[in-house]
Each structure stands twice: as C-alpha cells, then as structure tokens.
Amino acid sequence: MEKKRSSYTNYKPEDISGVKLSEEKYSVIGKSVPKIDGRVKVTGQAKYTGDLKFPNMLVGKILTSPHAHARILSIDTSEAEKLPGVKAVITHKDVPSLKYGISPARWDENIFCIDKVRFVGDKVAAVAAVDEDTVYKALKLIKVEYEVLPAVFDVYEAMKEGAPLVHDEYPRNLNAEIHQNFGDVEKAFAEAYYVRTDRFVGNRAYQAPMEPHSAISIWENGKLTVYCSTQSPHYFQYYIAREFGMKMGDVRVLKTFIGGGFGGKLEPTGLEFAGAVIAKMTGRPVRMFYDRADMFAHNRGRHRVHMEITTGVDKNGKILGVHANFIQDGGAYTSLGIATAYYAGAMLPLTYDFENFKFDMLRVYTNLPACGAQRGHGAPQPRYAFESHLDRIAEHLGIDPVELRLRNARKPNTVTPNDFGVQSCELTACIEKAREISGWNEKKGKLPKGRGIGVAVGSFVSGAGYPIYRTDLPHSSAIIKVGEDGTSATLYTGANDIGQGSDTILCQMAAEAMGFTYENMKIVAADTETTPLDFGAYSSRQTLMSGAAVKQAGEEVKAQILEMASVMMEVDVGDLDCREAVVFCKSNPEIRKSFGEVARTFFVQKGPLVGRGVYSPPKLGGKFKGAAVGTSPAYSFATQISEVEIDEETGEIDVKEVWDVHDCGQVINPSLLHAQVHGALYMGMGETVWEEVVFDDKGKILNPNLGEYRLPTALDMPKISSELVESYEPLGPWGVKEVGEGATIPTMGCYNNAIYDATGVQVNSLPLSYEKVWRALKEKREKEKNKEE
Amino acid sequence: MYLPDFEYYAPSSLPEACGLLAQFGARAKVIAGGTDALPKMKQELMAPEALVSLKNLSQLTNIFYEQEKGIIIGSRATHNDLANSPVLQEKYLSICEAAHHMANNQVRNRGTVGGNIINAVPSADLPPILIALGAIVKLVGTGGERTVPLEEFFSGPGKTVIKQDEILTEIILPDQPFTGSTYMKFGLRRSGALAVVGVAAAVVMDGDICKDARIVLGAVAPVPIRAKKAEELLKGKSVTDGLLEEVGVCAAGESKPISDIRGSAEYRRDMVRVFTKRALKKAIQEGHC
C-alpha cells in the first residue's frame, strides 16, 4: 500500500482560535518588554570574554613603558623566556611594522613601539604563559634600556617652536588642523548688538567600562578567530586582516557579552594583535587582558579641550554668528581623535538656528595617553562652553535663559550652516516641557540662597553618515531565519549589544515587522562569520540603522508568510495580515491560521524561510573638508534642567533633581530608553563634577583605579525625571532616533548654569569640583570685601 | 596584578601568633580583613615573607560592656560589626556612624577596626572619634600585655608604637562624662571616598556651658591630632555660633595639611574650620550622633 509522504507526520497545528489580538497600532514595539539577556546577566550565567576558557589556553599581558617619552635602546627578553611556564615573549621584531589606527587619515600606531615610547603605558612587548602569576613575573624580567627624552604634557608647550616632537612627521605636534567658515561671522559680529567671548577648559575623563578589555585568539587551519570585548566586530576584523595581510574571510571576530564600551572599545588594541601573533607562534589559544590600571593607560577617553567661544546676538538675543576656537589635547596617538576634533565644532549649530559659523581647531599631540571617542563624541565639552556662555549673554541682555533658547531653537526641516539636514526636530517642545515639569518659572530667581536652577540643550547624531574607513559597504544588514516548525525565529545581525539593549529592541522590531511574538525571538549577533555585516555600536546608530535592516528583513519574512497562507487558506493575499504570530483575514479576523503552521508548511514545501534586510544612509552632507563628520540621517534633541544646592562653605554640589526631556522619535522600548537617559546623565554628571584623569609631572597617571578616579555612586545620583515629546523621524524605521548619547551632552553646561544661578560664580574649567566652587566663592567674597573697603 | 608568594599562618592562639611574629620579625605582617594588606601587596608596596592571619582568634571579634572597664571592642570586629553593634549604638552612636560611612559595604564587611588603626593612614575614619572618646588600645606580645592611649599610639603616616611581636587585641572605651560626640567626614563623593578632612568632637555640656571638649582632626596632619588650643577656647564658655566659628578658625590654625590629588592644603585647612564648627554644633545639640 502506498503511503502519502505528506501525511507521514504527527504535527498538529496550534489552536489559535481563542487568541485575542491587540487592538493597538503596534503589537511588540513601544512596549517595555524584559531585556532578552536580563536573566542570564543577573544570575551570572552570562560569560564575558575574560570568563571563557579553551583547552590549553595561555594567558598574556603587554609590557608598557614607564616613561612618557624615551628612546628604546635595547630589549632583553632572555630572562623572561627562561622562567618556567612562559611560552612566548614578543617585541616589535615579531610583529608586522605596518602602522595602524582607527582614523585612516592618521594611522600612527605600531603594535609594539619600535624606536621610541610616547607615553607612560605605550606598548613595548608581550608575554604569554600558563597562568596569570607567571605572566606578571615574566613581565618584570624583560629588561628594556631607555634613553629618556624631554616630554610635553601641555598643548601650548607642545606647539612651541623647539618643543620635543611626539611624532617627527608632525611639526609643532599638530596632529590635525581644522578651519571651517560658513557665512560671514565677521560681518555678523560687526552688525551684532552684543558680542561676547568666553574661555573654558575641559577635563580628561575616561569611559571606565565595568568589563576590562580582553581578547582570546585562536588559530585553526589558517583561520584566526578572536573573541573580544569590542563595540565593532567588523572594524576589528577589517583592521586585524589589514595588519596581517590576511583575507577578511580568514579572520573571524565575535563576542559573547560586553560589559560596556562608551567609545573606548571601538578600535583594536594591542591585545588583539599581540594575541594573534602569540597564538600562531605557540599553536595554543591565548587570552590577552588588561587590568584596571592598563585600561586607564590605554585610555582613548575624553579629550581635554581648551575652548574660546565668541557669539554675536541682536538686541532680542537672536544669535547672529558664532566663532568656536578650540585646541584639543590628543595625547600620543590619533585614535578616533580626528573625528572627535571635527565633532567638537560640527555639533554646535545643530541646536540653534544661525547662519554664520566659524570653527577653528587644533588637535595637538602630547606625551599622554591617546584620547578618542567617549559618549557624546566631541560634543559635550564644547556644549558646556556654549551653554555656559549663552547664559552670560542672556544675563547681559536681561533675557530669561529658557526664553533665549526658545528664541533660537532649531525648527524641523532646516539645514545647519555646515550642511546637516534636519527633518524631525522638537527642540522647542522639549524646552517648553522641561520648563513646565521643572517648575522653572516658579523657581528661577526665587530659590533660597545657595539653591539654583540651570538649563542647557543638546543634540546628537542617530548614526554616523559615513563609515570610519572608506567603503561603499552598507552600514547594516540582517537575516531572519524562521525555525523549521515555526515556533521560533532567529535574528542574525552584526549589531552589537554592549549593554545598551540592542539585542532586545532589534528582536522587538523583528517580531513587529514579521507579525511575530517577542517571546519566541532568538538572536545571534555581532559575529563576523555567522551574522551579516553591521558596523556596530557607536555614534548611537543601531536603533535607526540596524533597525532599518531588521525591519526590512522582518517584512520580507512576513510577505512570504502571507503568500504561503494565501495558498493554504485560499484567500487573496491582499486580505491577509499577520500579527502576534496569527495570520488572519482582514475582512474577517476569525478566519485565521497560526504563523507556526504557515511557516512550517513553507519549510516543508520550499525550504528555509528567510528574510533579508540591508541599510545604507542616503547621501549626506556638504562638500567642504570634513563635511562628512557629524552627518546623520536624523538628529535627537534634548533639554535638561537641573536644580542644585551649593554648600557655600565647602563648595559641595548637591544636585537635587534633573529633568531631561528628549526628542528621540518613536520609542521601541520605553524602559530601556529611560535607562539610557539615566546612564547618559550619570556619565555626564560624573565628568561634570567628579571625574578627571590626573597625572604627575612625569606623565604618570595618579589615579588609575576606581578608588581615586571618582565615578559617582548610587548615593550621588539625583532624582531624575526623564520625559519625552511627540516626535516621528521620517528617515528612521517606525520614526526612531537616537537616545544613548544625547543625554550626556547638556549635563555639564546645565550643572554649570545651575551653580551660577545658586552662587553667582562660574567655574570655567571641568570638572566643577567642590574645591573649584569653594575657591570661586572665596574669590568673590574677597572681591566684594575689597569693594566695600 | 598578582599576589607575590608568601608563607601563610593562621595560628589558633594569641601566644602562638605573637610567637610567629617574634620569629619572623620585620619579615612578617599581620592580616585581619586584608582590605589594606592585599592591595598593598598587589601593588608591590610591601612584600612580607609571611602573613599571620588572626582569623582563628574569634574572641577578638566581640564588642561588649564590662563593669568598671567600659566598652571593649575586639580588634577583629569589622566596620559593619561596629556599625551594627547594639552596645555601641546605645552608648556611642557616633562610632557606629563613623564606621557606617567608611569606604563601601564590601570593605565594611571585611575591614576591621584593628586594621584601620594599625595601618595608621592619616585619613582613617575611626581613630579621630575613638581618640575623642578617650580610647585605649591593648597590645599583647610575647612578653605580656600593655595598654596605650590611642592618642599616643600613632607616630607618623603608616607608623605606630606597636612592637614587632605585638598584636592589637582590644580597643577599650572607658566610661566618661561626655554628653555628646560625633565624627564628620568630608569626602569628595557620598560613598567610597577617603576623607579630605575628618573632624571628631566630644563635649561635656552643662546647659549652654561647654564644660569640656575634645576636637580630633583627621587627614590634616601626619597622624590624627588633637586641636588643643581650640578645645581650650571652648571650655567653660557659653556656646554661640560666633564662638564656634572662632574655635573652628583656631583648629584650622592647628592643622598641618598637605596638598594632594584630593585637595590643596589651603582647602583642607578651611574645611577644618568648617567641620570643626559643624561637628561641635552637632555634638552639642544632638548628643552622641
């Protein structure tokens, strides 16, 4: 008897007749679903790179320079090699001499220093051994003979004729020079009612992610696999392949879980390069790692910017022109600093509508650790200067600071003088809402002595308009594969969850686009071999860019599901829809089939059910030099108001409450969004009041630990009200924009303005430490006393 | 960072512990909570050949009251043991508060009062309030035991009068007439910050009149110091805000701060003025707090 093949199954479709479909516009997005990795993280089940163990794995560390500037005369590794347990000791002789970096405009780093070291912490050699203790002991046995050279630690000293050169190729230590001029600033100043110049200095801050950097390198059959703590597997893959002259296809970079990045894990470190070489030499996997002090020395944190800012306004406070004249301490290498330098000026005109803008910037090499991208990339310190400066202008004109900002706030569908196109922009609504919820009108000028209230605004990109290195590859792509039996779907994306929650929101977006459920989504992310290209987690790009690719992939799945269902149900495809894993007739929703049954039938008849998506931003920006930096398909806008109480005897700053109102387009996951605001504000306020990397007069960091590099604690956090305004970005999937960095940007200026309101003194350098406030108050009292006499 | 190699001993009696210390001499260090010793060893600031742990000497963790003697605090009591001790909370809440505001909870669970004293860090939080309340420390060595007023115990940063074979076993707080005491710490964030200035005050009040006072300053001299001139200024007088300001200025003058990454000498000196004034006011108005 012949048995029909199709009946050879026990499959019974799920009964979905009773499932009540949501009547809301969206089924999955816009909801605070639980974080997809929440449980494994809080239970400790989640393993980070440093937790991974492979059979026969070695551990390794990098030997760094004790001098800020010195010629390497000789390196003797023989004693270290003799130590039992040591399996490899390498120096510049064992690695390619090709220079690398992250900004292609200035590749200026070697895996290990060849002729000289340029800061305390510069990389000289590496050791791998059977355990950590042996590694530390071996490091001490490497003898490096140095000739110490004069060093420069200050940008003004570094630019003097005859100053020691950090890199011989860069006279006067000028790493980059920017001169941009839009409109006619001189004319604007000549016509202005009031022109004012103020000067400010920033601080060197460090990202201090909770997870220290580490990388595990493994060679198999000519292929290099690197597990690492990275914000961008793709860029690591590109730079590692380039350094070793390998095909990108022979380099696989992936991650497990990442404990924060904030910009500091965007570029490959010596760990990946040295680990790759040692793993090849020894034929064993090797885990290279930084400890906390190494992280501070590697750095790539916030640049200290010296800022002079001049603004001309009319009688009503309308901004006519702005000149930003900045000098940035870059440290010993370029890192991402060229982009940081451009960002410092480029982001200023976003918030206010003015036509004349001049931006001059010098990025200067010094014998200090290299600075790079830190949350808000280049924007927060200049924003502190600009917002503090605008309050002085408002005071001079007798205009309320909130009112001054409202008069100048950017409107939607406008173009900045530096050619950034802005579609959605609800800055005015943000300012008005912040004024209302903070009780500004009831408080401004009416608070008791020592209390003050301040305002500042900000704006940030929703993904950089151009990749870091020149390429026409799309920025994001995604694949969704529906499981054979239709009960689950897996999203494959190169997007990288570094703690911010992108795995969660991308699964929400996938489920929404497919007509599926979040609870049944799985994700494989940030692995250059199994997931399709995405540039990764930086410039607040993933919700918009990765999201756009995921949405497209989900829609492709849904289209195939509906087509299959149309055949199965004998209903016209135009009358079918799918949500929450239920395929139904729009004309009669009681006629339905489960997503699972349709997907399973699809697999039986046609093979894997897969959807694909890809995203490239539209062509953005102007034609001038540096026009690409700061371009983005969309910009977020934010207003912060803070209320502070100053202890006038000690200078202690007690932040009572902060109100943050964001225009971040449509929201995918409200609780993750507000968590981003809290986190960004936390980092912003840390840099504002407490955090600073401090050096001795030899360029050695005095506080490379979490005891003396004072991140705020839970007890230091103020009450936060994070609110949103209605907004929809036409260029974002479901109208989304950024939030991750935007709330870091206004904080420094906002606190400074509140402190001024409370005390009448302005601190013109970050951090706004208790002692600086105390000193400013003391000087003010002395001045007043002298006046009386 | 890694721990250098060392020999480890966990003796089960005090004489045995003292014997080991005598045997190794300067090459041995005592370890209690380890919150100071282990980081120092990892940072290569010290490399003892042997560590003598007090972990098996459990009698050293007790906190109790003994008639005619006062409160006895075992040297191995942790900061959280102090903060949560009913005996201390009843008599000198000020000590509990000082312990509670130290470092962070993890350190307070491990770190001990004995370690906080023995390390003789100028910014340590417990010595000022213990000195203000007249604490005496008991030292046990191979040759017997002795007591030293805590005020005379410190001889410089990281230095004390303890002998190589001695172990600090008890802190004794004799009964005393103080009506109020407090410790105020000024750190640069609300948790996990070392004191930039610490001021302990103890007072005997009779109505408005301050009959007796002790002011102890931390983090502004090589060792915790009494501001004796400031104390004299206050004694026997009716307390007013103006007088407290004067006393604060006087204490600031007695301090000998240095500049470091946490604050300049100038700032520290002025903070002595501010916190002397505030600590006295608190002790006068709120008792032991």
Image (spheres, rainbow, N blue to C red):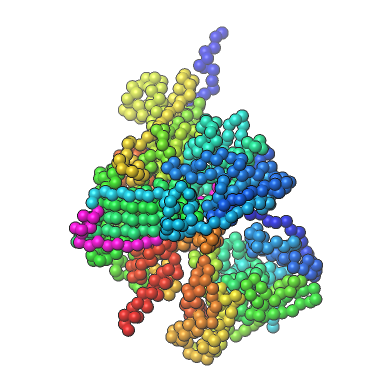
Instruction: Using the rendered image of the protein, determine whether residue B164 is visible from the camera's viewpoint.
Output: yes
On-image quarter of the N terminus of chain A: top right
The residue located at (67%, 71%) in the rendering is B118
Q: In this view, does A755 lie above or below A613?
A: below
Q: Is residue A508 left or right of residue B80?
A: left
Splitting the image into 4 quarters, where does residue A104 fall? Answer: top left
Q: Is residue A2 left or right of residue A379?
A: right
Q: Nearer the viewer, residue A10 or B182?
A: B182
Q: Which of A160 and A657 is in front in this view?
A: A160
Residue that lies at the very extreme toward the bottom in this rendered image: B236
The residue located at (64%, 64%) in the rendering is B36
Residue that lies at the very extreme toward the front in this rendered image: A162
Residue B163's spot in the image, x, y percent? 74, 74
Residue A597's spot in the image, x, y percent? 46, 25
Q: In this view, does B102 lie above or below B200?
A: above
Residue A121's spot in the image, x, y percent? 56, 53
Residue B27's spot in the image, x, y percent? 75, 65
Examine the structure image and report whether residue B178 is included in the region drawn in magenta.
no
The residue located at (36%, 67%) in the rendering is A762
Magenta segment boundaries in residue numbering: A185-214
Instruction: Using the rendered image of the protein, determine whether residue A508 is visible from the camera's viewpoint.
Output: no
